[in-house]
Image: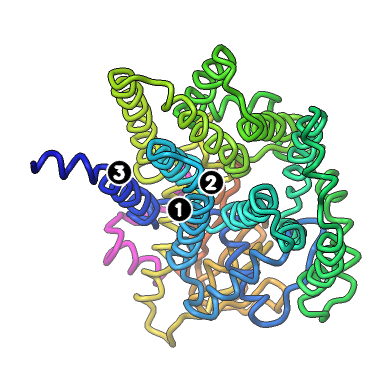
Amino acid sequence: MHSKKIYKFWPVITLIAIFLAVVLLRFYRIDARMIHIDEGMGLRYGQLMFDGAWHYNPYNSHGPIYFFFGSLIYGLFGYDLVAARAGTALISMLWLTALLWLYWPLLRTPGRLLLAAGLGLSSGMVFFARDFIHEHIFILMTVGALVAAEMWVRHRDFRAPLSFVLLCVLMYATKETALLTWAAWGIAAVLLLLKPGRQHYLFKMNWKSVALGIYLGLMLYALLFTVFFTDPMAFINSFIGPLKWLDRAQVMHQRPFLYFVGLLFVREFPLVLGTVGLGWWLTSRKKWTSRLAFYALWAAFITLIYSLISYKTPWCIPNLILPLGLFVAFAFDALWITLKKRQKQIWLLVAVVILAAGTVGAWYDSVIHPDRVLAYDYAYLQSDNSLGRFIQTLKDLNNLYDGEKPMTIQRIGYTDELVYVLSNPYHALDSSQPLQLGLPVYINFLHDDKETLDRLKQSGKNYIRSTYMYIRDQGTVIDLFVEEGLWNRYLTEVAHEQVLPGENPLYDYSK
């Protein structure tokens, strides 16, 4: 009797176990990865949005949705990276829950569980859920548009076309790559509508709802990009953005055509194996449906479109994983009803083993080795423990400094968003301000170190230089110039290292 009760409730128990794993993978040691340069941008631009100083930049910033979210984080927690990452992780769970709610009536228990596990435990979905960037916000908007489309296809809800247009606006207001998703959707829809008998989805469209959606969408678009009409030129610049990104795509982050395919095979093998195996089964048994065909075409075309663009960054991968997860869940659901009891047990065991292997991979990728940079790793433009030592050294120097806290430092050279965020806990003067001699610490970035040292010698004090790796992929370094007496205290009381001989010994921590 006891075993029968457990068997009766196994779907609920399994779903709870999956969600516990989803939560664990997203929140456990969420600070394990070194802060990423784009996270610095998100935190800094979030502050600018909060202060009313953010303006859309068509050259190098996506739409305002991400920065509105960043301003909320900044307003509540300040420059708290853990809180920011936790916010992104919560968003990733929100869209996953929305998908389960949307497709719960259409799937049987195995399909539901596979949808939750396939997308919730995917290595790429987990990795970027623990990263304070825009991708999961974009996926949330994408899922929202999918919900609206489903409401029209399944229920002919007159509000659905309006909602779909508004969600598409929110997609673009998050990231210009919405154009690529729209293209994949459009091609897939056209190919499906070419089959006789399917045109009624288009001909019976509620065009009044579409027109109202376009009107309200334009108002929403203008409102968001101009930040409530405080920057009118941003409306025009927002249409220039894709052209500027196209220019950058010719020279930056260029990777081979098959980069994303390789990334999927190496890191997302559970969904790739499922897609190949179940796709073969659907074809051999002639079990394809319109829904399955749409997911397959979406996955194929979004992968092809992203692959055709030379500009490739690994954080685009959730856009490719999403349709794969949907396809595998629905294809497995179609397979399930054709199987006998023994066959179901075998297929279930195969699915559990493959997903378990993928989950272990997600654990290693996101928790154990989140800063690792190999050919098909998700970390890119990544800093490592060297930058962590830079951050900790600043904290230690501030604690040792006998003067007013926080200590006054000055940035020399270039100040990007990440340098700004890292120096924000201190009273930091920028390079645009006149050089103030005699400070305890200076940050030197993308500026000749010899020239910096010569300028600092004018104070009559000796400064010790220590060098750290800033971004490993680019080989860029960042320097600290520390007043000799303070540095000696640091070596004696914190680092416990011997002072090297010479007037200005160099401590190189970039290796």
Residue type at the position of mark 2 = Gln
- Screen quadrant of the N terminus: top left
Colour convention? rainbow
Identity, as a three-letter code, of the amino acid under mark 3:
Pro
The residue sitting at the top extreme is 284
Which residue in the structure is indicated by mark 2? 382
Residue in view at x 49 percent, y 59 percent: 94
Secondary structure beneath dot 3 equals helix
Say which label, 2 or 3, has the lower sequence index.
3
Q: Nearer the viewer, mark 2 or mark 3?
A: 3
Q: Is residue 488 magenta?
A: yes
Q: How many marks?
A: 3
Above or below, comparing residue 189 to residue 165 in the picture: above
Callout 1 amino acid: Met
Give the image location of residue 136, x and y in percent. Answer: 56, 54
- Label 2 sits on a secondary structure element that is loop
Please identify the residue farthest to the bottom as the structure is shown: 404
* Residue, disc 1: 34
For the point 79% across and 27% down, which residue is it? 195
